[in-house]
């Protein structure tokens, strides 16, 4: 099996946010026109509009304008997946811990101390949806095809040291030990890398498939299937 490029599209970003192209970590095209991008070093989304072979009209969008993040500062979400379903744009963070890197200009003792330091950034534990209509995001709006239906932004509830998902998985026979042991993502710990979303069988329900970068168990990667239902 071989892959052949269909076409190439040049991305054009505002000069003030040109740095985002260095850390792009997620992408989703909506309606063959709007290209949504995630940067794993920010708490933002990037939207460019496709016209021919150029994607321009860049918008730098803060997730805090639509969602309630634990740390509404510059703390990254580490966006690792973007999905789209029925006028909702879905965003998922890595849900992972970080370990400090060793530095070439540091002493052995300093690097050993650095490697012992773990960091938890609460914004990373994000699984959320945001209403999307014609390339624009909203906190709340009417469904464009059904005015009697209201679209609302929503997210999994944040918990101490995680969210509803990580708390639930602490009792999982395959993943629980990794979460309880606080293993960083880069050390084969819990680490989300992608998302796909589909309508559920019942009204108001959604099926989300979460791809994990880790842990990998004896060469087996893990895919989580979630059933999500709006609470209220």
Image (cartoon, rainbow, N blue to C red):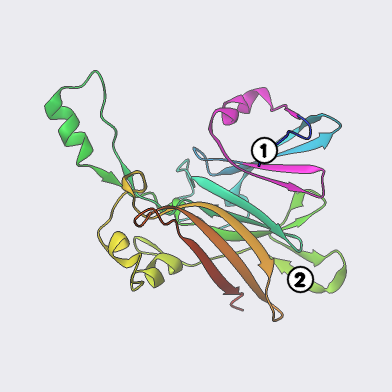
Image-quadrant location for residue 147? bottom right
Q: Which residue is mark 1?
A: 2
Is 25 one of the magenta-colored residues?
A: yes
Please provide the residue range marked out in magenta.
Answer: 9-37
Mark 1 nearby-residue class (10 Å; few <14, some 14–19, many ≥20): few
Of the two numbered discs 1 and 2 in the rendering, the one whose residue sits closer to the viewer? 1
Badge 1 marks a residue whose secondary structure is loop
Picture residue at 82% right of the left edge, 45% below the top? 32
Badge 2 marks a residue whose secondary structure is strand
From the top left corner, tell me how far across and down residue 130 is, in percent. 67, 58
Picture residue at 72% right of the left edge, 56% below the top? 138
Q: Which mark is residue 32?
A: none
Picture residue at 69% right of the left edge, 37% below the top? 3
Q: Can you name the residue that lies furthest to the top here?
A: 105
Q: How many discs mark residues in the rendered view? A: 2
Nearest the eye: 44 or 188: 188
């Amino acid at each position: 099996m071989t892959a052949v490029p269909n076409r190439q599209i040049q991305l054009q970003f505002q000069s003030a946010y040109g740095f985002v192209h260095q850390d792009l970590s997620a992408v989703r095209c909506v309606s063959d026109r709007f290209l949504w991008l995630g940067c794993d070093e920010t708490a933002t989304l990037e939207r460019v509009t496709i016209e021919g072979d150029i994607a321009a009209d860049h918008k730098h969008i803060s997730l805090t304008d639509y969602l309630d993040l634990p740390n509404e500062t510059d703390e990254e979400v580490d966006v690792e997946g973007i999905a789209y379903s029925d006028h909702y744009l879905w965003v998922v963070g890595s849900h992972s811990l970080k370990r400090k890197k060793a530095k070439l200009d540091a002493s052995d003792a300093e690097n050993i101390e650095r490697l012992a330091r773990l960091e938890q950034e609460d914004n990373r534990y994000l699984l959320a949806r945001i209403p999307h209509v014609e390339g624009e995001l909203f906190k709340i709006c009417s469904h464009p095809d059904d005015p009697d239906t209201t679209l609302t932004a929503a997210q999994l509830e944040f918990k101490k040291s995680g969210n509803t998902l990580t708390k639930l998985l602490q009792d999982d026979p395959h993943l629980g030990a990794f979460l309880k042991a606080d293993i960083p993502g880069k050390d084969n710990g819990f680490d989300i890398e992608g998302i796909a979303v589909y309508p559920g069988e019942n009204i108001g329900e959604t099926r989300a498939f979460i791809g994990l970068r880790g842990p990998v168990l004896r060469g087996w990667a893990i895919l989580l299937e979630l059933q999500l239902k709006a609470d209220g």
